[in-house]
Image (cartoon, helix red, strand yellow):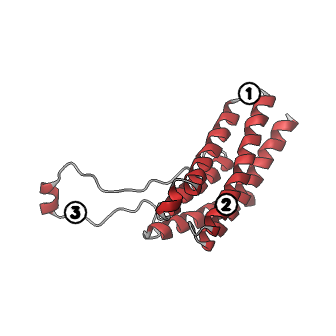
Amino acid sequence: MEDNENQQILLDELEKEIQRELKLPDAVGYEPPPISENEKEENPSRKPFRIKDFDSPRDKEMAVFTHAKKLSEYIFVITEKSPKKLRWSIISRLQNTSVEIIEFLYRANFEREEEPRISFQKRAAVGLKLLDFYAETARKKQGITIRQTEVIARQIHETTKLLNGWVKSTKRK
């Protein structure tokens, strides 16, 4: 029970960090101020902007998926402000690797046999190591800040711990 609470606290911290990067209020599900009648008449089909949150670990999805998704979301948020000269090199690798990790996790989850499942879990683990390397390189090239690198490192560490637990439970079966 305490583990779930710790994971929820980490996810809440990451959510606050994402909102700080986006310069949004702390409330999840941010909605803009009401639109005046004149604005509604000018553009009646426009819907208000709304940010949807990922499932929390209390839902049916495993915590490793939730943490990986939050990490990927955070990476995409912070890298949209990166220098253009880095966007097609280290930044794109950072973004692509974060998405590949989620892909490998889903592929592992759908495998019923132990060998292919462990293979995808290992690929996800390697992806997390690469993500750490890319984040450090992006920091050195001033594509992201030291603070952003710290947040990414913490989230990578937590996701790796959850992934290792999943690998151990797969091997025990």
- Is 121 rendered above or below residue 56? above
Please tell me which residue lies in front, 160 or 112: 160
What amino acid does circle 3 point to?
Ile
Q: Earlier in the sequence, mark 3 or mark 1?
A: 3
User: Considering the image in quadrants, where does the C terminus appear?
Assistant: top right
User: Considering the image in quadrants, where does the N terminus appear?
Assistant: bottom right
Percent x, y of residue 80? 47, 60
Please tell me which residue lies in front, 113 or 152: 152
- Location of mark 3 (residue): 35
Q: Residue furthest top?
A: 113
At 77% from the left edge and 54% from the top edge, which residue is drawn? 161
Let me know if residue 124 appears in the view. yes
- Is 33 rendered above or below residue 117? below
Let me know if residue 61 appears in the view. no
Mark 3 nearby-residue class (10 Å; few <14, some 14–19, many ≥20): few
At 68% from the left edge and 49% from the top edge, which residue is drawn? 64
Say left or right for 91 vs 152. Answer: left
Mark 1 nearby-residue class (10 Å; few <14, some 14–19, many ≥20): few
- Location of mark 2 (residue): 155
The residues bearing labels 1 and 2 have C-alpha atoms spaced at a distance of 28 Å
Q: Residue furthest right?
A: 172
Helix, strand or loop status at disc 3? loop
At 55% from the left edge and 59% from the top edge, which residue is drawn? 74
Q: Earlier in the sequence, mark 3 or mark 2?
A: 3
Numbered circle sitting on residue 147: none
Tag 3–tag 1 contact (CB < 8 Å): no
At 76% from the left edge and 30% from the top edge, which residue is drawn? 116
Numbered circle sitting on residue 112: 1
Percent x, y of residue 11? 61, 61
Q: Select label 3 or label 2 by which is in front.
A: 2
